[in-house]
Each structure stands twice: as structure tokens, then as C-alpha cells.
Amino acid sequence: MIKDFTHQDYAVFGGGCFWCMVEPFETRASIDSVLSGFTGGDTQYPSYDEVLSGGTGHVEAVEIIFDTRKISYQELVDLYWQLIDPTDNQGQFQDRGNQYRPIIFVRNEQQRKIAEKSKQKMIESARYKQPIITEIKAISTFWPVENHYQQFYKKNPKRYKRIKRYRQRFLFYQYLKGEIRRRWHKIKNN
């Protein structure tokens, strides 16, 4: 529950299906709330079905309200990178389409600088063979999805666990490939 609004901020991330973006953030003690929804497009009051069709310009995203005394925006960005494939602009994992592309939405210049610096660090890590394509864009209106789509991981635990397992395996495989690539570059350059 939110008790002190003076130390509250928010972050918005698009990272594929929002169902898999809620739980990793929401289960952290320093997060006040996580809301699934849409942003980045032109359609006002979009429904889940409209965004799913791909014609609204919106992406599925999560809005995270957090206590700045307990967690920083940088820490949220660091967690975000662990949840996505930053090289895939056609969607994320099994979810394909423009509405699933990875985007860090920023609300001010401070967030933009943190996101850009973090992205540059990812690029310089040589962990990925493909270019890092995750966009950094100014936040537009965030439209919460209909209530029955909120809290998917709690309402559908078995299905969520299957989806989560698939994502974790893919990300772990990608991490291992990146570590091998990074170490190979290090050996090659010495």
C-alpha cells in the first residue's frame, strides 16, 4: 500500500506479453504496484483485442510504481534487461508482432539518461551477436488493460509457470551464448 507519495516514482516497460512482466517486478518488496496495459500508440481507450490485432500502434507494457527510498530506477532497468531479448524487434519469445516489441518508456530526462547509459553498457558488453534494438521513447498515455487481464500470474498459475519456464530457458541459453562470446572476445583481444 502506498503511504508516502513524496518518495514515489513510476517506470513503464514494454517487454513482450505483459503477463510475464508483472510478477518479476511485483514480487519485490520495494514495488508499490504493477499495472498491465498499453502505451505508445494513437488509439484512445484501447481494448486487449484491439491491441492484440496489431493495428493500434500500442505495445503491451507494465507501469511500475515504486518507492525511491528502497529501489532506484536504475535497478528497475537492470531487472528489465534480464526479462527480455533486447535483440528482437518482432516481438518477444513466443509472442510475435509489433505490439510485443521491447521498449523502455521514459518520463523525464533523468530516466532517459539512465536508460541510454544502460543500453550502451549492454551494447559494449559484447554479450549479444545481434544488435541491441530495444527502443527508448517518451511515455505517452498509459492505458490499463481490462481488469480480467490483470494479475495473470495469480489467476492462471499453471499456464503462467509454463510460459515463465520457456522464457527463463531461452534467456539462460542466450546468457550462456553471450558469456561464451564475451570471453572469446576477451581472449582474442589479449
Image: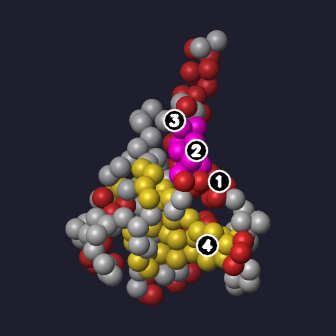
Are circles 2 and 1 on residues that touch, CB within 8 Å?
A: yes
- Element assignment for label 1: helix
Residue 133, how many percent across, how many down?
41, 44
Note whether residue 89 is visible.
yes
User: Tag 4: residue type?
Assistant: Ile
Residue 142, how many percent across, how many down?
43, 73
Find disc 4 in the rendering and name its residue. Answer: 65
Q: Earlier in the sequence, mark 3 or mark 4?
A: 4
Residue 64, how many percent across, how many down?
58, 70
Disc ID at residue 74:
1
Q: Earlier in the sequence, mark 1 or mark 4?
A: 4
Q: Which stretch appears magenta? A: 112-122
- From mark 3 to mark 1, how far is it between C-alphas? 17 Å
- From mark 2 to mark 1, how far is it between C-alphas? 8 Å
Q: Earlier in the sequence, mark 3 or mark 2?
A: 2
Q: Residue at x 74, y 83 (%)?
A: 3
Q: Residue at x 50, y 59 (%)?
A: 106
Of 24 and 172, the residue lying toward us: 24
What residue occupies the far top of the structure in this picture? Answer: 190
User: Tag 1: residue type?
Assistant: Gln
The N terminus lies in quadrant:
bottom right
Residue 169 sits above or below residue 123 on the image: below
User: Tag 2: residue type?
Assistant: Ser
Disc ID at residue 109:
none
Task: Describe residue 35's horizontal placement relative to residue 91 as left or right.
Answer: right
The C terminus lies in quadrant:
top right
Find disc 2 in the rendering and name its residue. Answer: 118
Q: Residue at x 25, y 66 (%)?
A: 54
